[in-house]
Image (cartoon, rainbow, N blue to C red):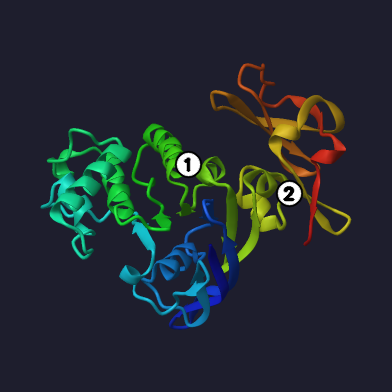
Amino acid sequence: MIRIERLAKRFGGVLAVDGVDLEIAQGEIFCLLGPSGCGKTTLLRCIGGFEVPDEGRILLDGQDVTGLAPWLRPVNTVFQSYALFPHLSVAGNIAFGLETLAMSKADREARVAEMIALVRLDGLAARRPSQLSGGQRQRVAIARALARHPKVLLLDEPLSALDAKLREETRLELVELQARLGISFVFVTHDQDEAMAISDRIGVMQGGRIVQVGAPAEIYDRPATRFVAEFVGRINMFERGGAWIAVRPERVALGAGPHSGIVRECAFLGERRLIFIDSPLGRMTASVAGSDGAPENGATVAFGWPADAERALPQ
């Protein structure tokens, strides 16, 4: 569906996207995940046509769209700021992108009504953006982007302005919406939990490059590099035999094992407790059920993990 070949984009002397090769399938939710400045938004903007790459090309359904203007691509974008027109109603915002299409007024009104129903904004068509909640404004932005029936929807951190509970609810709505439409979603975020929850596959970016692509479970359980291991979720890292050994905190068991250390802190997070232990391996973290009892600070504890919990990574 989307094929990116050796894509590079520079801003002055800064190489923001560095020779990216990537394929995204039809009907897939693909997440570009990485820290600020890693190039994920620049790559998304290249796909959308808002940035022109210096090298490489972008193909959609086999068509080279590298040099096409954004409005000539079968792609629409939901921006982080939503970019709604404050003087237009919900219906007016959704209809705006349809003005350039050869549609009758009746067809445009029908399409707007279809989009309002799709994102569950019934009864709010006449409201202005200032009269909507953050979640409702986000739905308007999505409806406007979908009104032209794009083949690909690009989402640039569209949930970052929402509070934690609403963000979780909206994630689920996006997954359900994508399943109903069957189109490809390309989603940019720096939030690991968000990427794991919403994606079919994740591309982790570092320094303008995609350093690993895989399903969420693969990225989490089998990170390819130390950067991926440390960026995606909590991780314990220590050196052994010239390699970094990575162990997820939930695989660390307390009370028995070949290692021991002193408990420095216990953090209660509701469903889980994090136990921070100073040991000869360095600072180690164990994650246990929130209902389990926690050792006292200063206590000496034994700990260990099964052999299959270890992941050896290159230096």
- Rendered position, 308 above or below 33: above
**Residue type pointed to by label 1:** Ala
Which mark is first along the chain, 2 or 1? Answer: 1
Q: Callout 2: 10 Å neighbours few (<14), some, many (20+)? A: some
Q: Which residue is mark 2?
A: 222
The answer to which quarter of the image holds residue 289 is top right
Q: Which residue is mark 1?
A: 179
Q: Position of residue 131 (x, y in %)?
A: 15, 39
Residue 17: in sight, yes or no?
yes
Q: Nearer the viewer, residue 98 or 156?
A: 98
For this view, does 294 lie left or right of residue 86? right
| Distance (Cα) linking label 1 and label 2 | 27 Å
- Mark 2 lies on a secondary structure that is loop
Q: Position of residue 101 (x, y in %)?
A: 23, 63
- Which quarter of the rendered picture does the C terminus lie within? bottom right
Q: Position of residue 25 (x, y in %)?
A: 56, 57
For this view, does 141 lie left or right of residue 312? left
